[in-house]
Image (cartoon, rainbow, N blue to C red):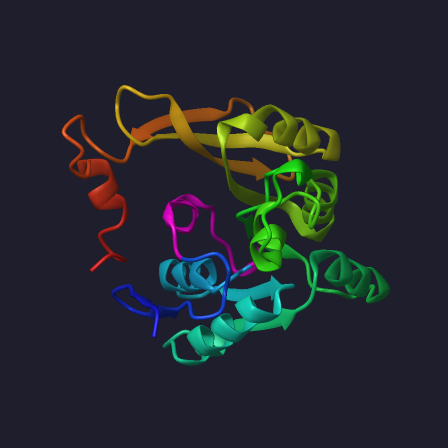
């Protein structure tokens, strides 16, 4: 069985197209928390489990469209010590938004996290599960961003992990929706290269001056950096 082990929980990834990777680790440790958190496109559930560990008082709602990913997430949630605080919905974000719109007393969140699909349709792979997980055709940026804005309380936070190639277009959608950028984490793989990933934290409200943070996952000799080891010390075995 394909299992990735963290200190406080395990991730079974037998069925999901997208396995545990750096993006989920970065977002799971750098995203903003809250009391009621929504995880959009949870996949195996790793991000929800990381957030449950980081924020002991939080209740987390996870949604996932892919049948195979849901199979893994169900097992991972049920077998974890955080199970009572996790709720999984087998549904698309678009369907979830429609349900919440119909329910005028629907729950608003103070934190939303998403590792969004970011490849365009011309690059779609043959595997349907990977296509849904990685490509914007399954969840276009305007739908994701405006939907997140509508589901957040005033002052709520929206955290994502994206590559540099879509940074400008994603931020433009956030500004259009009404978000203000609070924190931008520029994550390099090694010191001599440009940032490989950006973790962005947007606020439904006003921000005087966005804060920019630059970190590197590995040293010049390719060993793990002290920053990355400190970041993941409560998770990696």
Q: Is residue 109 left or right of residue 69?
A: right
Q: What range of the chain is rendered magenta?
A: 20-41
**119 and 24: which is toward the camera:** 119
**234 and 57: which is toward the camera:** 234
Q: Is residue 27 above or below residue 109?
A: above
Q: Is residue 47 above or below residue 213?
A: below
In which image quadrant can residue 169 be found? top right
In which image quadrant can residue 104 be found? bottom right
Split into 4 quadrants, where in the image is the C terminus? bottom left
Q: Is residue 211 visible?
A: yes
Q: Is residue 38 magenta?
A: yes
Q: Is residue 177 left or right of residue 25?
A: right
Tell me where residue 128 appears, x and y as whole percent.
62, 57
Residue plotted at (70% across, 57% down): 93
Tell me where residue 13 appears, x and y as whole percent.
42, 67
Q: Is residue 168 above or below residue 116?
A: above
Tell me where residue 116 appears, x and y as whole percent.
58, 46
Instruction: Return the residue found at the far front.
Output: 126
Q: Is residue 12 left or right of residue 228?
A: right
Tell me where residue 19 appears, x and y as whole percent.
42, 58
């Amino acid at each position: 069985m394909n299992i990735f082990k963290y200190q406080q929980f395990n991730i079974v990834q037998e069925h999901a197209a997208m396995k545990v990777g750096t993006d989920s680790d970065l977002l799971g440790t750098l995203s903003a928390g809250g009391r009621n958190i929504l995880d959009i496109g949870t996949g195996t559930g790793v991000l929800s489990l990381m957030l449950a560990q980081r924020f002991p008082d939080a209740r987390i709602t996870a949604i996932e469209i892919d049948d195979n990913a849901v199979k893994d997430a169900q097992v991972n949630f049920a077998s974890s010590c955080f199970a009572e605080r996790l709720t999984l919905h087998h549904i698309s974000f678009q369907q979830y938004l429609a349900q919440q719109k119909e329910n005028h007393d629907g729950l608003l969140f103070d934190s939303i996290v998403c590792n969004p699909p970011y490849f365009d349709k011309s690059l779609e792979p043959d595997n349907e599960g990977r296509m849904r997980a990685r490509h914007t055709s399954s969840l276009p940026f305007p739908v994701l961003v405006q939907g997140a804005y509508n589901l957040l309380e005033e002052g709520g936070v929206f955290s994502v992990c994206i590559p540099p190639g879509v940074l400008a277009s994603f931020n433009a959608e956030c500004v259009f929706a009404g978000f203000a950028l609070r924190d931008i984490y520029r994550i390099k793989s090694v010191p001599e290269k440009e940032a490989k990933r950006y973790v962005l934290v947007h606020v439904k409200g006003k921000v005087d001056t966005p804060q920019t943070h630059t970190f590197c996952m590995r040293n010049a000799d390719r060993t793990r950096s002290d920053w990355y080891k400190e970041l993941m010390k409560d998770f990696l075995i």
